[in-house]
């Protein structure tokens, strides 16, 4: 799969002036609760990833259709809680720098394992590692260096990320694990997800070779993801660097971090790069969870996460509620009319993404089918989601302006200059 350039920005206005108005929480309390929320949400992602690790270890130890399905189910369950954290990414440099190791996408899966070359191809002008197949190799060449890959380690997998300066080289994270569980989705915009057989891990009746290495890679990739999530949870802990970096900022700058994450995920990342781009190109390669056909859930829980951060709330996997002062409270105290508008636009965005989720969950059509050229219903569902997310982002910007803050939101060429998107 190919990486695409994220371009452009939309700005929300004016100057830095501390908000001070009646019945509002203190900005410092809002910022502190945001850090508490980050610790709780990354903690939930870490906890559910550990449960996934148990299922994956059990699958590799005793491969069968049943243990493979349990591992897949555990991946989807854990994925739900990770997606809710994505609003912390933009604006927090430590999170954005770390994110490439856990959720980089798209990826050229031929770097990791065997691929169906009749559909995938054998070479790429953009990526010398397009079919490097670490699992089947003892060494690979990255630029002028020959790299020993006989031992699969977390360090190796991290070093594969963006190897040779190519963003589509991804060795670790959610999508590497997804590919190893499901395999390639060779169905284009037709029905069906990846269909990797459990026998790809069966040492006695191995299919496609290197079953021992494949099992090692899957286990190490999972171990690496769990460790990365633990690191991020700790970074938001009482003495963590991410918390310290945020709390060191003045109030307005701290609030701007929160709004930057909300606006950037809603506008440039989710509405633009993850949804509108694929719709323009009618390309199933632009489906976020492309191997598992889980994209509808990933999009939905991104929006859930946006709302949770905005409203200052989160429900842990055990049902425990985390609540506290939020930027929503600040806006409502300053301008109830704008607060009402954000509520309405946010509800509409959730409903639009849920319509996509419900359609996919019903079995009528998966997200990659919705992207297919000529699929009017699918295109309408996705475009409605895009429009609602853009409207949500703009409403949030108006809230930012009401608080007299200044932010810069990530854009997307697919929204800002769609005529320039490559339509190959």
Image (spheres, rainbow, N blue to C red):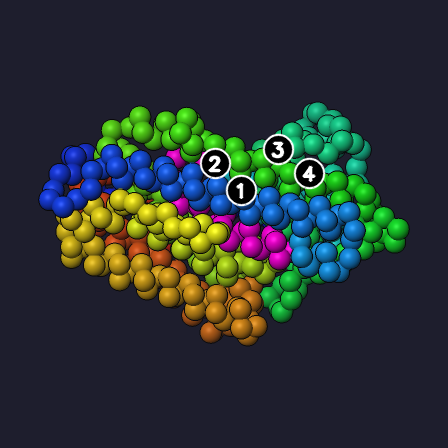
Frontmost of labels 2 and 3 is 2
Residue range highlighted in magenta: 72-96
Q: CA distance from mark 1 to mark 2?
A: 7 Å
Dot 2 alpha-carbon crowd within 10 angstroms: few under 14, some 14 to 19, many 20 or more? many
Marked residue nearer the N-terminal end (1 or 3): 1
Relative placement, left or right, of 92 versus 170 is: left
Relative placement, left or right, of 291 versus 7 is: right
Circle 2 residue: 233
| x then y, percent, for residue 383 | 41, 65
Q: Is residue 384 magenta?
A: no
Q: Is residue 110 visible?
A: no
Q: Quadrant of the C terminus?
A: bottom right
Q: Considering the numbered disc 4 on the image, is that residue within a helix, a strand or a loop?
A: helix
Q: Is there CB contact under 8 Å for labels 1 and 2?
A: yes
Circle 4 residue: 220
Marked residue nearer the N-terminal end (2 or 4): 4
Q: Residue at x 56, y 59 (%)?
A: 294
Q: Is there CB contact under 8 Å for labels 4 and 3?
A: no
| x then y, percent, for residue 205 | 88, 54
Between 133 and 35, the one nearer to me in the picture? 35
Circle 1 residue: 46
Q: Is residue 95 magenta?
A: yes
Q: Is residue 336 visible?
A: yes
Which numbered circle lies on residue 158? 3
Q: CA distance from mark 1 to mark 4?
A: 16 Å
| x then y, percent, for residue 61 | 77, 47
Q: Residue at x 57, y 72 (%)?
A: 363
Marked residue nearer the N-terminal end (4 or 3): 3
Outermost residue toward the left in this view: 22
Between 313 and 222, the one nearer to me in the picture? 313
Q: CA distance from mark 4 to mark 3?
A: 11 Å
């Amino acid at each position: 799969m190919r990486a695409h350039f994220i371009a452009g920005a939309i700005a929300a206005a004016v100057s830095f002036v501390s908000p001070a108005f009646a019945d509002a929480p203190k900005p410092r309390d809002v910022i502190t609760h945001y850090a508490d929320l980050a610790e709780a949400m990354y903690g939930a992602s870490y906890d559910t990833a550990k449960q996934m690790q148990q299922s994956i270890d059990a699958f590799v130890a005793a491969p069968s259709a049943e243990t493979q399905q349990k591992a897949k189910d555990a991946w989807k369950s854990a994925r739900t809680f990770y997606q809710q954290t994505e609003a912390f990414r933009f604006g927090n440099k430590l999170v954005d720098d770390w994110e490439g190791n856990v959720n980089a996408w798209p990826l050229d899966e031929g770097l990791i394992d065997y691929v169906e070359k009749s559909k995938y191809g054998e070479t790429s002008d953009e990526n010398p590692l397009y079919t490097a197949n670490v699992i089947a190799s003892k060494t690979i060449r990255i630029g002028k260096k020959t790299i020993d890959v006989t031992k699969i380690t977390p360090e190796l997998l991290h070093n594969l990320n963006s190897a040779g300066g190519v963003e589509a080289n991804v060795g670790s994270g959610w999508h590497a694990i997804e590919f190893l569980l499901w395999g390639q989705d060779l169905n284009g915009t037709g029905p069906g997800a990846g269909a990797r057989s459990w026998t790809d891990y069966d040492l006695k009746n191995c299919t496609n070779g290197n079953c021992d290495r494949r099992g090692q890679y899957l286990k190490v990739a999972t171990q690496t993801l769990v460790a990365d999530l633990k690191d991020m949870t700790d970074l938001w802990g009482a003495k963590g660097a991410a918390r310290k970096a945020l709390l060191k900022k003045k109030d307005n700058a701290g609030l701007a971090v929160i709004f930057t994450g909300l606006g950037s995920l809603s506008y440039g990342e989710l509405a633009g790069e993850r949804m509108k781009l694929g719709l323009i190109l009618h390309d199933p390669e632009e489906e976020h969870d492309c191997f598992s056909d889980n994209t509808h859930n990933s999009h939905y829980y991104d929006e859930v996460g946006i709302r949770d951060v905005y409203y200052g709330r989160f429900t842990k996997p055990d049902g425990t509620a985390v609540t506290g002062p939020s930027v929503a409270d600040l806006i409502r105290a300053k301008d109830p009319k704008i607060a009402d508008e954000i509520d309405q636009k946010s509800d509409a965005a959730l409903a639009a993404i849920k319509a996509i989720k419900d359609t996919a969950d019903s079995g009528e059509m998966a997200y990659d089918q919705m992207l297919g050229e000529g699929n009017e219903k699918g295109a309408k569902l996705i475009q409605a989601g895009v429009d609602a997310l853009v409207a949500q982002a703009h409403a949030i910007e108006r809230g930012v302006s009401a608080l007299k803050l200044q932010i810069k939101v990530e854009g997307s060429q697919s929204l800002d200059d769609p005529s320039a998107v490559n339509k190959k």
